[in-house]
Image (spheres, rainbow, N blue to C red):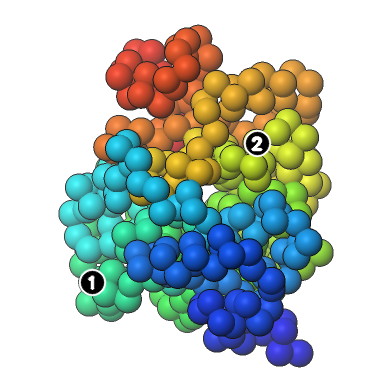
């Protein structure tokens, strides 16, 4: 059936206002925001993910992640285009080597859905940002020549946009580098395009155990029958260890009930909640930001009252490339949370995460 063909889903993504309006009734506010936001960040949604939107609820958590809103057009003083300073730590095109023992490899500019809070708005959806085959080889040579690298993280865009044969090649080349301990894939396709998880893909992935895949579910409504089936196939057929990182998002998952439902459903699906991220300070993200004090209150409520295996680590990736810190209420005593974290950060006070 065409609907279940991941390539059909990608080829039939909704990318323009007219087609979107043919599929869902938009508010006047959303129409204006869509047109203005398109000047600096692409829009895209698969028919599958669009079908999950509650069309009668303007605050539907999937709708709010997908359709531009006025807040995205406001750029606050603390917001920057590259909050994690990935370009600063890029020795060769596509490779960010910020932590000593691991490197992130940007291998695709394409996503099935462009999340409105995306950290990589500056480059996602832009073909010229994607390394070509020659640049792949330069990246691989960099990994071979840096024996301190123990882990390589395939990211993007979405790395599962690549063909099975391309992924097989990259995984094989990385697997041959003796000092690389393991490989991680960051993908939102189990959420936005679960059809991409096919038997042929899992056959490729199963060759490279241990292989870790970090998904990005933000709300329990994203864990559909199709998504859960895809995860089960990854685990059982692909021999993949699946973790999840969520972003704490205003009006989407910023209650104890929301996160409890999400994390328990992840565990039931075989996925370990890994990180809960404080939203990055990327341009246009202010409407999604939850105050850190509220995030800490939620984590206090969850920890000790819900199963420990269902509790992710609450982290903030410091703007400017300082790395992840575990958010600890002992050090957050001001309502001016984010600035306080930046001002007082040092390795003696914060536990450095990975």
Instruction: Give the left or right position of residue 208, taking residue 267 as reference.
Output: left
Kindly indicate the quadrant of the structure image that contains residue 213. bottom right
Real-space CA distance between mark 1 and mark 2, rounded to the nearest whole angstrom: 40 Å
111 lies above or below 9? above
181 lies above or below 55? above
Question: Which quadrant holds the C terminus?
Answer: top left
Q: If you read the primary sequence from the N terminus, does the residue marked by circle 1 or circle 2 appear first?
A: 1
Q: Which mark is residue 254?
A: 2
Assign a secondary structure to mark 1: helix
Residue closer to the observer: 317 or 115 = 115
- Residue at image point 49% right, 62% down: 33
What residue did someone put label 1 on? 135
Question: How far across and down, in percent of the image, does residue 164 sit?
Answer: 52, 78
- Residue at image point 33% right, 72% down: 126
- Residue at image point 51% right, 17% down: 328
Residue closer to the observer: 295 or 242 = 295
Assign a secondary structure to mark 2: loop
Q: Furthest residue to the front?
A: 28
Kindly indicate the quadrant of the structure image that contains residue 46. bottom right
Q: Which mark is residue 214?
A: none
218 lies above or below 347? below
Q: Furthest residue to the bottom?
A: 1
Instruction: Give the left or right position of residue 24, taking residue 38 as reference.
Output: right
Question: How far across and down, in percent of the image, does residue 113 sit?
Answer: 54, 67
- Residue at image point 73% right, 44% down: 262
348 lies above or below 174? above
Does the image show residue 159?
no
Kindly indicate the quadrant of the structure image that contains residue 95. bottom left
Does the image show residue 56?
yes
Question: How far across and down, in percent of the image, does residue 69 sit?
Answer: 53, 56
């Amino acid at each position: 059936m065409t609907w279940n063909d991941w390539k059909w889903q990608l080829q039939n993504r909704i990318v323009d206002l007219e087609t979107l309006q043919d599929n869902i009734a938009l508010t006047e506010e959303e129409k204006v925001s869509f047109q203005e936001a398109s000047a600096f960040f692409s829009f895209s949604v698969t028919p599958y993910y669009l079908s999950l939107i509650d069309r009668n609820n303007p605050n539907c958590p999937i709708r709010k992640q997908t359709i531009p809103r006025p807040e995205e057009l406001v750029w606050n003083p603390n917001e920057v285009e590259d909050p994690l300073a990935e370009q600063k730590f890029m020795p060769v095109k596509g490779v960010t080597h910020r932590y000593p023992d691991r490197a992130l490899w940007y291998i695709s500019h394409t996503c099935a859905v462009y999340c409105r809070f995306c950290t990589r708005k500056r480059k996602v959806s832009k073909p010229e940002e994607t390394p070509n085959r020659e640049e792949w080889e330069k990246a691989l040579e960099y990994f071979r020549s840096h024996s301190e690298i123990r882990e390589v993280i395939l990211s993007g865009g979405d790395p599962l946009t690549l063909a099975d044969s391309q992924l097989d090649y990259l995984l094989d080349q990385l697997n041959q580098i003796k000092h690389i301990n393991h490989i991680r894939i960051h993908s939102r396709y189990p959420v936005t395009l679960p059809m991409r998880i096919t038997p042929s893909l899992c056959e490729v992935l199963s060759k490279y155990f241990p292989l870790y895949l970090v998904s990005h579910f933000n709300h329990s409504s994203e864990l559909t029958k199709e998504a859960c089936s895809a995860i089960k196939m990854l685990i059982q057929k692909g021999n993949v260890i699946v973790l999840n990182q969520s972003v704490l998002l205003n009006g989407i998952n910023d209650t104890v009930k929301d996160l409890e439902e999400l994390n328990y459903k992840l565990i039931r699906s075989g996925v370990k909640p890994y990180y809960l991220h404080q939203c990055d300070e990327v341009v246009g993200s202010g409407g999604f930001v939850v105050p850190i004090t509220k995030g800490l209150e939620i984590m206090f409520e969850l920890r000790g009252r819900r199963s420990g295996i269902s509790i992710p680590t609450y982290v903030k990736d410091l703007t400017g490339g300082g790395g992840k810190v575990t958010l600890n209420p002992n050090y957050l005593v001001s309502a001016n949370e984010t600035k306080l974290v930046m001002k007082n950060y040092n390795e003696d006070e914060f536990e450095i995460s990975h």
